Image (cartoon, rainbow, N blue to C red):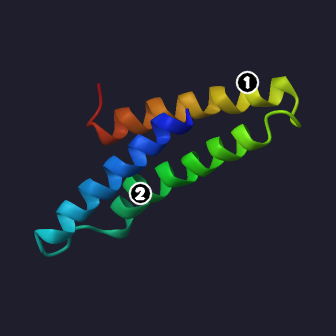
């Protein structure tokens, strides 16, 4: 999950940067920054933290956190991609 979120973070940074370079009035807004950059970076850091603490945390907690990350990833793709 950490690698997937890292790729999503890099994609978000590239896409956000391309919108900034076009100098369109009103774009990008703060919501786009949060959705395409902040959320993936936060999930990447969370995944990395789970990897670092994997030997100290209970297995059930790691499985639960991974499941939540999968659900967030699906929601992120559906919402960011325009839906089904």
Q: Secondary structure at mark 1?
A: helix
CB atoms at circles 2 and 1 under 8 Å apart?
no
Is residue 2 shown above or below 45? above
Rounded to the nearest angstrom, the CA distance separating label 2 from label 1 is 25 Å
Q: Quadrant of the C terminus?
A: top left
- For the point 37% across and 53% down, which residue is it? 36
- For the point 45% across and 34% down, which residue is it? 75
* Residue 28 in the image, given as x and y percentages of width and height: 25, 67
The answer to whether 44 appears left or right of 13 in the picture is right
The answer to whether 22 appears left or right of 7 in the picture is left
Q: Residues within 10 Å of mark 1 (few under 14, many from 20)?
A: few
Is residue 60 shown above or below 10? above
Q: Secondary structure at mark 2?
A: helix
Q: Nearer the viewer, residue 6 or 25?
A: 6
Question: Any mark on residue 37, and which?
Answer: 2
The answer to whether 11 appears left or right of 7 in the picture is left
Quarter of the figure with residue 33: bottom left
Quarter of the figure with residue 78: top left
The residue indicated by pointer 1 is: 63
- For the point 64% across and 26% down, which residue is it? 67
* Residue 32 in the image, given as x and y percentages of width and height: 34, 60
* Residue 57 in the image, given as x and y percentages of width and height: 86, 35
Q: Residues within 10 Å of mark 2 (few under 14, many from 20)?
A: many
């Amino acid at each position: 999950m950490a690698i997937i979120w890292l790729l999503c973070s890099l994609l978000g940074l590239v896409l956000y940067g391309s919108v900034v370079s076009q100098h369109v009035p009103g774009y990008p807004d703060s919501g786009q920054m949060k959705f395409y950059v902040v959320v993936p970076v936060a999930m990447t850091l969370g995944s990395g933290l789970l990897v670092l603490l994997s030997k100290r945390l209970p297995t059930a907690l790691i499985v639960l956190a991974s499941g939540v990350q999968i659900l967030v990833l699906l929601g992120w793709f559906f919402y960011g991609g325009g839906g089904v």
